[in-house]
Amino acid sequence: MFSFKNEKRRVKENKIIVVGAGISGLAAAKDLQTKGYNVTVLEATDKIGGRIDTDNSLGIPFEKGASWIHTPIGNPLTDLTKQTQSNIKVTDFDDTVAFYNDGTKIKSSDYWSAKKLFYKQHEQIDMYGKKNESYADVVSKYFESMRNDDLQKFFIANYVTFDTGETNKLSSTLYNYGEEYEGTDAVITNGYEKIPQYLAENLTIQFNTKVHTIDYSLDKIQLNTSNGSYNADKVIVTVPLGVLKKEIIQFKPDLPFEKKQAIKNIGMNHVNKFIVTFDKCFWHDSQFIILTKENPNKYSWYLNVNKTHENCNALLTFAYGMDAVESEKRTDNQIKDEIYNNLKKIYKHQTLYPTNLLRTKWSQDPNTHGGYSYTSTSTSMKDFDILAKDINSKIYFAGEHTSRDYFSTAHGAYLSGKREARKIIKLLRTSNFKL
């Protein structure tokens, strides 16, 4: 016979473990704990947030991972910024000054004409694309200006490779998939970290606990970790796609074939960020500064951090794809030299040498092995659904790579964690009502 007293007791008896304290894991754990479930989060590192990682060592927030709240109107993270008293500032992508590789300024009318042409051609790629054919293949065959013009190549690098993946591996038919909310992207000026900090309040989190194996062959699931063994009734795995690709966690029995294939099929992009400070500001008072170059996949796009943090005298720049991976082999001084030499093309004798550099190395990070997922030439949209499927109502999966609509985004990761929490709550409530 059902009673609410018995249900409450059974809720507490159900032990749930969440693997990973990124935003998806924290979202799942918070919702489950709010409903009274016994939840423990196992985190491989010594901090929460995962790929939301704010470094304040320079006195300004350097967002090593997620930087923007994309299309914030309707975005669930916007509600969280209100609850966390986060300061939001909209990014003005129109506030841009652009230069050719020799330092010659590009006329504003020429820049906007080129950008309009880029978007027109970008939207036509899938008209020519074929299954298993890459974005780069289509550009090479049908779009000469995108292939040869330095400004068009800049747009491809910073609006395609940055947001998705390397164009020679990016699907020519699925490159534009994914849903968006409304509005212009915004940054949290007092740190993206406020969101995971809020979600983590009052949660039980075991840090420095790296999961080695998850054995779900018996009634109770056993997890062997670097910090001992744990038992659970349900497990939510929220580690990044890069970790799943490396098979760092061993599953017993092995993952179903279709899930292993989906892990293989979906691409994992590489993006690194570099923030440099100077003794004084010598650049334009624009939100963005562009330098077109033969290789636009690194240090070609500069965000003026002074626009969000006054008088900080800092610029933020990026590297994408294999250039991001290659950058991780270079020393800090080598990176400073390259950035200095690029800026010197624009500002000639005004350029100062960077005083400080902070950087990321996401492809080397053993807890991420990359930035975020994208639709490669081997991907089908069904792969995202397969990654979101649970195994035997025991092992559940969350993370941006499990979201068909919002993959590669922080809000996609957040929503996926809440999705898995709902599935478990519904299942356990249904089973309790039957008792």
Image (cartoon, rainbow, N blue to C red):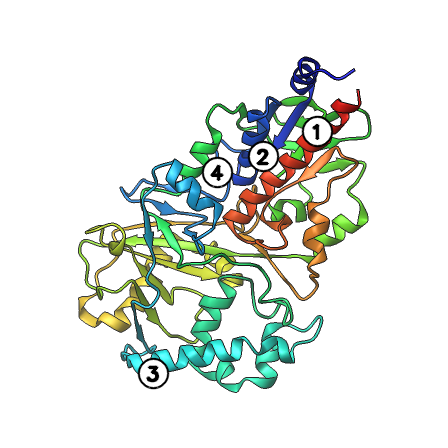
The three-letter code of the residue at mark 1 reads Lys
Residue where numbered disc 4 is placed: 49
Residue where numbered disc 1 is placed: 234
Spot occupied by residue 269 in the image (x, y as percentages of width and height): 56, 57
Q: Earlier in the sequence, mark 1 or mark 3?
A: 3
Q: Secondary structure under badge 1?
A: strand
Residues under numbered marks 4 and 2 in contact, where contact means CB atoms less than 8 Å apart: no
Q: Position of 335 compared to 249: left or right?
A: left
Give the quadrant of residue 21.
Answer: top right
Give the quadrant of residue 167.
Answer: bottom right
Q: CA distance from mark 1 to mark 3?
A: 57 Å
Q: Earlier in the sequence, mark 4 or mark 2?
A: 2
Q: Earlier in the sequence, mark 3 or mark 4?
A: 4
Q: Position of 247 compared to 252: left or right?
A: left
Residues under numbered marks 1 and 4 in contact, where contact means CB atoms less than 8 Å apart: no
Q: Residue at x 71, y 71 (%)?
A: 131
Q: How many marks?
A: 4
Q: CA distance from mark 4 to mark 2?
A: 13 Å
Q: CA distance from mark 2 to mark 1?
A: 12 Å
Q: CA distance from mark 1 to mark 4?
A: 22 Å
Q: What label sits on residue 28 in the rendered view?
A: 2
Q: Position of 308 compared to 42: left or right?
A: left
The three-letter code of the residue at mark 2 reads Ala
- Residue 30 to residue 140: above or below: above
Q: What label sits on residue 110 in the rendered view?
A: 3
Q: Residue at x 63, y 34 (%)?
A: 421
